[in-house]
Image: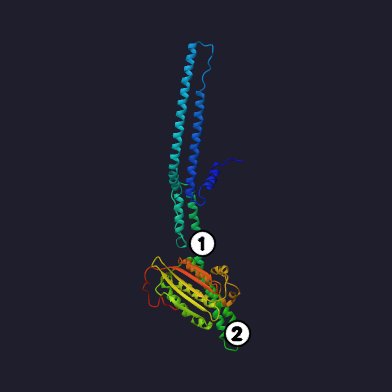
Amino acid sequence: MTWDPPRRLAGLTSRLGPHRGTARTRFTALYVMLFLLSGTTLLAIAAVVSSGGSRSSQIAPDGSTDQPATAGQVQERIGELERQLARAHDTQSQRVLIGSAIALGVMAVVSVGLGWFVAGRVLRPLNLMTVATRRITADNLHERLAIRGPDDEVKDLADTIDDLLGRLEDSFDAQRLFVANASHELRTPLTTMRASLDVALAKPGPLSETTATLAARMRTELDRVDRLLEGLLVLARSRHGDFTDSAHLPLGRVARDSLAGRAEDVTAKGLAVRDDRIDDSACVRGSRTLLRRMVENLVDNAITHNAPGGWISVAVRGEGDGAGTVSLVIESSGPVLDQQRVADLARPFRRHGADRTGSDQGSGLGLSIVAAIARAHHGALDLHARPDGGLRVTLVLPRAAGRMAAEAPGAETEPAR
């Protein structure tokens, strides 16, 4: 069994100190304990040396009974002086030990402040690295920590993180390039296939029922692939935060436009819509295209997965100005859902139950696109299963400062796609 003082001391401080303290607190506790241990050891050594000197001073030289009387008196006098000297030595040693103990106590208190200061200085580069790393996001991966100083362990860690950020930047750039290329390369053959199918169906002459059925089925599948591709591209774009059309948008007006765009589907299902709790003045700032797509997906989800003859409630509320938030709450009727499975719906290609597995029920990307767009705009999405059936979706976004900026006519009221 080997003795490992640093590890033993670290374990001792972790047991005696706060279990959830910061590294600075643990370092301070370690410094104080090391100081107390070394000071106590020094006092113990001084006490042992002092007691040994006292005992040696109390040993009187052997006297002989056959010495003359005058010599015996001298010897007795010498012994008395030695005893007095020993008592003075003991008194002085006690005073020194007491003074040292008091000084040790005072320095123990001082060592707490010194240990806290030294620990802060030692951990300062790590704190700077933490702040800089938190500041770097997908939008500014080009930034680096660039820690300056001697070539020690801290600088090696900073250089390693900078290398990692460089690799992440290259990876994000490659993904952005892929998204741009995929948008062109994949849509072109889909458009060609759809056009070829339309040309074949438009040729003169009768078509067999089987051919017409297969053509309709193929057209439906092509449309579905097109929607799936569009959803994947929007999802990738929102995660990269590529906002080329940033603007102020009244979220309530976007919600009304989305409801108006699905009026036929609402009527076909016999749904009752409540939209009297919409604040049209609550504005958010972000990508006009992505924000509209986000609200459209929420409205589409509430209609598609609703029960015939059910209801939809849409509410938009703004709180504060600038530093406040805008919340969009969409509730819908429907079957009773499992909350644990509902929380998974914001992940790509996740559907809830058998009622969400048909080809006409979407691609499973709707809510995941909403969650990605919300995160890209520093917002949050919350899905909650209603106790009496249906779903409540709460979307919270930062509120834009002031009123909606003046835009081109119709820019903020463009009909939903």
- Kindly tell me whether residue 5 is visible in this rendering: yes
Residues at discs 2 and 1 in contact (Cβ within 8 Å): no
The image's mark for residue 171 is 1
The local crowd at label 1, few if under 14, some if 14 to 19, many if 20 or more residues have their Cα within 10 Å, is: few
311 in relation to 128, above or below: below
Mark nearer the N terminus (2 vs 1): 1
Instruction: Answer few, some or many: residues within 10 Å of disc 2's Cα (few below 14, many 20 plus, some between 14 and 19).
Output: few
Which quadrant does the N terminus fall into? top right
Q: Position of residue 369 (x, y in %)?
A: 51, 70
- Residue at the image point whose x is 49% and y is 81% from the top: 263
Task: Decide if residue 96 is on the left or right side of residue 269.
Answer: left
Identify which amino acid the numbered label 2 is placed on. Ala
User: Could you say which disc has been placed on residue 183 in the image?
Assistant: none
In this rendered view, identify the residue nearer to me: 130 or 190.
Answer: 130
Q: Calculate the distance from the C-alpha at mark 2 to the C-alpha at mark 1.
A: 46 Å
* Left/right of residue 406 with respect to residue 240 in the rendered view: left
Q: Nearer the viewer, residue 292 or 78?
A: 78
Q: Position of residue 213 (x, y in %)?
A: 61, 83
Say above or below: 237 vs 153. Answer: below
Where on the picture, by quarter, is residue 356?
bottom right
Q: Secondary structure at mark 1?
A: helix
| Amino acid beneath label 1 | Ser
Classify mark 2: helix, strand or loop.
helix
Q: Is residue 186 visible?
A: no
Q: Residue furthest bottom?
A: 205
Q: Residue at x 57, y 69 (%)?
A: 341
Identify residue for label 2: 212
Q: Could you tell me residue 261's position as x and y percent?
A: 47, 80
